[in-house]
Image (spheres, rainbow, N blue to C red):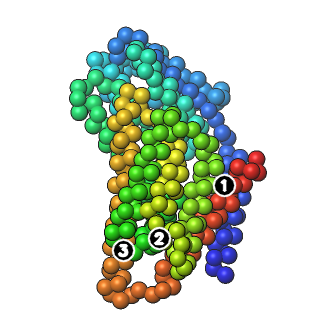
Amino acid sequence: MIRARWAWVLVLLGLAAPRWALAHPLDTASLFLSEGEPGHFRVRFQAGSAALSRELREPAVFPEPCRLEGSDLDCGPAGLAGNLEFPWLEGSLTRLMVDIEWRDQSRMLRVVTASSPRLAVYGGSAPGLRSLLPVLTDYTALGVEHILTGFDHLFFVIALTLLVRRRGPLLATITAFTLAHSLTLAATALGALELPAEPVEVMIAASIVLVCAECLNPADSLTRRAPWLVAFAFGLLHGMGFASALLEIGLPERHLPSALFSFNLGVELGQLAVIAAALALRAVIQRLRWQRAWMTRSLVYAMGTTAAFWAIERSWGVFGS
């Protein structure tokens, strides 16, 4: 009864979301920056509506020491490096496309929305590690954030820790999952592998349902005999999901390998944090003798039911359109 009630809540929220979105004006805008002389950019802003064009005085808050005069942006010898902030995006549904082109023809193309109204630009001329440090820091943090807020990946990792109880096999399983999603993350982000995102998301949700079902099934199966093999197979799918999120965020063309490595590192750190927390919680519950069979089953049912709902919802997006 409780699960059915929550399912109806999710269905009603899913039906209400499109109507809520249509109740607010959706606008678009574009910001183009093209470098002429070193550190000097020509700025061109295009608003999708006359109202936005009238209301907006400056298209962005540029980092120090950049100075905007008319359509000319002077950033000095350091070049354009730092955070571009767009406070006017807050509270709106406007999608802003930012297109930056440097003299060496390298390019940065991003979409900025109200959920994150700022853009980090790594175009400075600082030598060595100083130029890489912002990239490493930002993309590692993005990787950690993605695994901790991406509930489908989070559920899959937790389900693996519930399925594989012994530390040795669990280590092998997580290692196989890491290796697999690292391979497809890199291949997809670099353009060597291309698959439609929608079917991949359906299969990711289905992978959670399968592992949750195996957690509840005491019978012998391939998943229980070789969990590392199943984790590797599904890890290939999850890697494409990671890459889809990374490509949506965008990769700095000048620091592509560093950003890719840092994002993957962040994913691994977040994943290890989740596993460590799950194992620590299980150890505390066992030590205090609070463990009950219904606890694990309830958690598995909750994750499996949610994942099944995701699979149906995402399948509708694939086959219902």
Q: Which residue is mark 1?
A: 314
Q: What type is the residue that disc 1 sits on?
A: Arg
Q: Does any portion of residue 209 appear in the rendered image?
A: yes
Q: Which residue is mark 2?
A: 225
Extreme residue toward the right, this view:
320
Q: Residues within 10 Å of mark 3 (few under 14, many from 20)?
A: few
Q: Which residue is mark 3?
A: 166
Q: What type is the residue that disc 2 sits on?
A: Arg
Q: Name the residue at 35% across, 48% down.
A: 265
Find numbered disc 3 in the image and state the secondary structure of the residue it sits on.
loop
Spatial distance from mark 3 to mark 2, Cα to Cα? 13 Å
Q: Check contact, mark 1 vs mark 2: CB within 8 A.
A: no
Q: Residues within 10 Å of mark 1 (few under 14, many from 20)?
A: some
Find numbered disc 2 in the image and state the secondary structure of the residue it sits on.
helix
Left or right: 108 with respect to 78? Answer: right
Q: Check contact, mark 1 vs mark 3: CB within 8 A.
A: no
